[in-house]
Structure formats: C-alpha cells, structure tokens
Amino acid sequence: MTMILMRSPKGGVGTTFLTARLAIALAGRGHDVSAVDCTTQEALKLYFGLSPAQTLEMLDADATPDAIAGVELFQAYPEQDVEHVADQLLARCAKGKVCLVDLGTAGAQLRDRLLPHAALEICTLAPSPLALASLTKVDALTSVLSLTRTAFVLNQMDDRRRLSNDIHKLVRTLLGDQLLGTVRRDEAVMEALAAMKPLATFAPASAALTDVEKLTETVIARCGLTPGGRLQDAAA
Amino acid sequence: MRQDAKTLLDRLDRHYLEYQDFTAVAEEIELWPLFQTLLRDPRIVGNRDQSEPVQAAADRAQPEAQEAAPAALRTPSAEAEARPTAGLFGRYGRAAAPAPKPPEPPREPDLRNFLHELGKGRA
C-alpha cells in the first residue's frame, strides 16, 4: 500500500492539478492507481476531462469505478466524518494500490490521521509571497526543515518574472532535497480545462507535462514504487 | 500548442523545447524582506538557538563565511545607497558637496551565511 497525500496550506497553487497528473503518470508506468478528491471544490475530475455535472464514485461505496486514464477516481467529504473517511482511505489503499489523496487546504485533522500511514506528503507551493508565507502553516508542531515525510513541489514557476525567479532560487536552496521538483507555469493547463480535455490530449508538448514526468520519476524513487498490475481502461 | 511555438520548433527541427536549469548559489539570491523574515521563522527553519543540524552547520561555518563573504551583498536598499551623489551638487556652486555616505553594512549577513550553509549541506 502506498498512500501519497497531496495538500497545500494555500489554495489555488495547483495541488489538484498535480494530483491528477501524477496519478495519470504513475498509471502510465504500470502502477495500480486510485485518486481521491477530498475537497469541496470537486475539481479533480475536471483534470480528467469530465464535466462538473458528472459525479465520482463515493469512497465508501461498494462499487469499483471505471478507470479513466488508468486511474480509479473517488470522491470523499471528510468534513462530514473524518474518522470514517480516514478508515475508508486506509482500506482502499491496503489493496496494493498507489493512492493519491487530494486534501487541498483541508484541515489538519484528516492529514494528521493519515500522515503516519503515508509514504509521502507532497505540499504544493507557488512562486508568490503568499504561498511562501504559507510555509509557516505546513505543520503545527514541526518546523519545515525537520519534516521527514513531507516534500514540496514548486508549481506555476515562471523564471521570466523577477520575483518568481527569486522565490525559485530561495526555495531550491532552503529546501534542498525536500524540493521534489518544479513545474513551469503553462497556460495550456487552464486551456485544457476550458476545453474539457486532459492536458496530454489538448497540449501534448506542454512544458508542465514534461516537468510532471520528471517529477513522477522522483516520486517513484522517493517512495520506492515498483510497478504492479495495470488497470485496464474501461474504454479499452 | 500555440502556433508561434510550433513554428519555432519546426524551424529548429525539434519536437519539444528543452530547458536548462541554472543552479543559483546562495550569494546570488536576492533577500527580499519577506525572505529574511521567513528565514528567521522557527516554524520553517526550527529554533536557531538550539543545536539543530542546519543551524549547527551555519554556526560552525559563520566565521569563515564572514571572511569570505562577497564585498557587495545585493539587497534593494544597499544598491540604492551605494550610488555616488557628490558630483550632483558641484554645478550649483555650493561650497562643499555632501560627502557620499559610506555604504551600510549588509542587512542580514547571518541569513546569507545560513542559506549558504544550507546549500552546501544539501549539495
């Protein structure tokens, strides 16, 4: 069982985008992947080309959803019952899967409950002063540099802009190995959402896609993942 | 893909763009005031009064790092105050032009050393 928590103390930095793309990339490498949307925005499905009107299978449902791009998608509402959601997540992830959990900016309760069971927690940052300041909110008890299961991804990076460039340099030096990778700002990400198509379909040469592929290799190495059985797409 | 990007790739006979990462050294990082504040925040860097590994490395290297510190540490205010002003007043006949102020010492040399040691330790 490999659980990867995806979160950020600041919203709008691309946590859900990274959850979706990492899940798809891992599935493409032969891993058995589930992705669970634990946010009230319910945006994870949009990155798979689904419509806002479509609903995902509930995490506590008995049925197994069809895979999209090799990923089983679930929805959960931890604000209703944190313990129940945590138990369901642990049960799902116990079946030899790689389970990515999009916590968004969710409260600490579910995160603290799951972190001891997680192979990795990935916190998303963006090159903005607000996102940088949110580093103070990553963990209530432990300083950022002392966290052992938490790593970071700098998303939406744009080195053509002075402050973005400076934040990039700072974060790279400050976090060192805790910085798993950087993903460049790419308008194609938003355009793909507007087109209701997965990014790889809409813009196969996207810079963000290239960066996520590199990031995926780092995540695989960090978590010690080995490819398991591959899910067949429902359409295949 | 945007048409202008595609046109450029076609001209270069490439299918994708390759980007090169340039690693910054600690001395090249511009320490905005927010950066300085966050680098002192124990929620990020831990308690620097206690012997945490990162701070220990910074403390050990600090005497050597201060000797080797570059002469011009870039902060926005330091750059502005380093501009010479004496010649500005000469043509107006004033008896003595104001002497240029000596540049202020860098604001946070210990933070830059701290970053430098972080970078070394993680290399």
Image: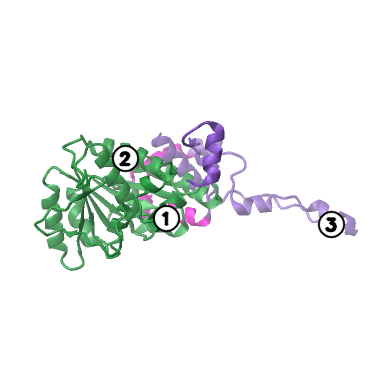
Chain colours: A green, B purple
Please report whichever mark, 1 or 2, sits nearer to the chain's N-terminal start.
1
The residue at which mark 2 appears reads as A216
- Quarter that holds the C terminus of chain B: top left
Circle 2 or circle 3, nearest the eye: 2
Q: Chain of mark 3?
A: B
**Is residue B40 on the magenta stretch?**
yes
Q: Which residue is rendered at x = 21% and y = 39% of the image?
A: A31
Indicate the amino acid at tag 2: Thr
Q: Is residue B49 visible?
A: no
Q: Position of residue A206 (x, y in %)?
A: 43, 44
With respect to residue B62, does A126 lie above or below? below
Residue topped by disc 3: B89
Q: Residue furthest left?
A: A62
Mark 1 — residue? A190
Residue that appears at 11% across and 47% down: A94
- Residue at (46, 43) in percent of width and height: B115
- Nearest the camera: A26 or B104? A26
Element type at mark 2: helix
Mark 3 near mark 1, Cβ–Cβ under 8 Å?
Answer: no
Mark 1, other Cα within 10 Å: few <14 / some 14–19 / many ≥20: few
Image coordinates of residue A201 in percent, x first then y, are: 36, 46
For the residue pair B18 and A137, the one nearer the viewer reads as B18
Span colored in magenta: B33-62
Q: Residue at x 19, y 61 (%)?
A: A76
Mark 2 belongs to chain = A
Left or right, A197 with reference to B18? left
Q: Amino acid at mark 1?
A: Met
- Mark 2 Cα-neighbour bin, 10 Å: few <14, some 14–19, many ≥20: many
Q: Residue A161 in the image: state x and y as whole percent.
A: 55, 50
Q: In front of the other: label 3 or label 1? A: 1
Q: Amino acid at mark 3?
A: Phe
